[in-house]
Image: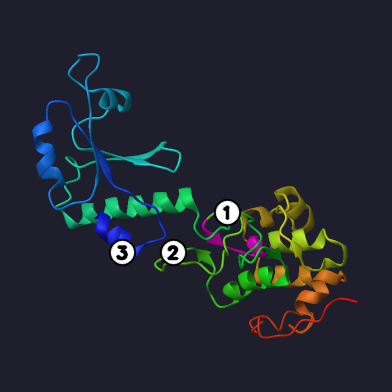
Amino acid sequence: MQKELSAEHPLLRITIGGVNQVGYDSGNAAIMAGRKLAWMQDIDTDQNSNGEVWDDWQAVWRDVFVLDGANSKVNLYNLTVHDLRTPANYAELKSILIDSAMVSQKPFTNESIAVDVDGNGIVAPRDALLVINRLNSGGGGTIAPPTGTSISEYIDVDGNLIVAPLDALRVINVLNQRTGGGEGEAAAPASGPMLEESFGSEAATGELPVGAVRNALLEPVSAHEWFFAQWGSEDGSGIGEPLLGTRLRRPR
């Protein structure tokens, strides 16, 4: 399974390891034969026959503890109850590991500056456009785990593993805080209350329709006008047209 995870999702930092129970040292060589695993042997310093790690984690035979990046337990899967020789169990454990890594690592969120969607160190209209184009192309909703070796668009601005209008709105709000709405060095994203005040409680759930995002951008504010000067009419009939090929004029 480790080889499969590393090959299929190289960007997700998933490592399978183990701690052998006290009294079973003789099995370590067989466990490691032909494998590269982070494998450790527990010790029994208090002489209670259980081992220190197994005591601390209250582990039972064949427990799989799923940990996040801070080494906190997020799931528990026992291989006696769920024999991995059953394909459904194997697939379930693999899915648990992938889902846990996605929640903990948030690979589609720029960990340096969340609103810098293209990762170039500058927050600009293009960052919002990348999200909106993804929504218009039907790419909204839950984000699938990455399968490549790099990510070019950090479209999950709020880190909830869902691409929604709220992700674009967070970029837009940051741009609107700047004089003239122009480009600038990356800054912290706007707060949730600001979004709710401007667009209602739907903004907090990420359920705003793309048309609502567009209408907000067409308000008579320079940054807004800069985004969609050539996108379409006020009634939203232009939604769905390609955006990134349009040359945007700088606001005067």
130 vs 213, nearest the viewer: 130
Q: Compute the Cα span from label 2 to label 1.
A: 18 Å
Indicate the secondary structure of the residue bearing disc 2: loop
197 vs 167, nearest the viewer: 167
Indicate the secondary structure of the residue bearing disc 1: loop
Label 3: how many residues lie within 10 Å, few (<14), some (14-19) or many (20+)? Answer: few
Q: State the extent of the magenta-drawn residues as a range.
A: 161-169
In the visual, does 210 lie left or right of 161?
right
Residue 76 tag number? none
Marks 2 & 3, CB-CB < 8 Å contact: no
Residue 7 tag number? 3
- Would you place residue 55 above or below residue 97 in this image? above
In the visual, does 1 lie left or right of 147?
left
201 vs 105, nearest the viewer: 105
| Residue that lies at the very extreme toward the right in this rendered image | 252
Residue 144 tag number? 2
Is residue 219 shown to the viewer in this render? no
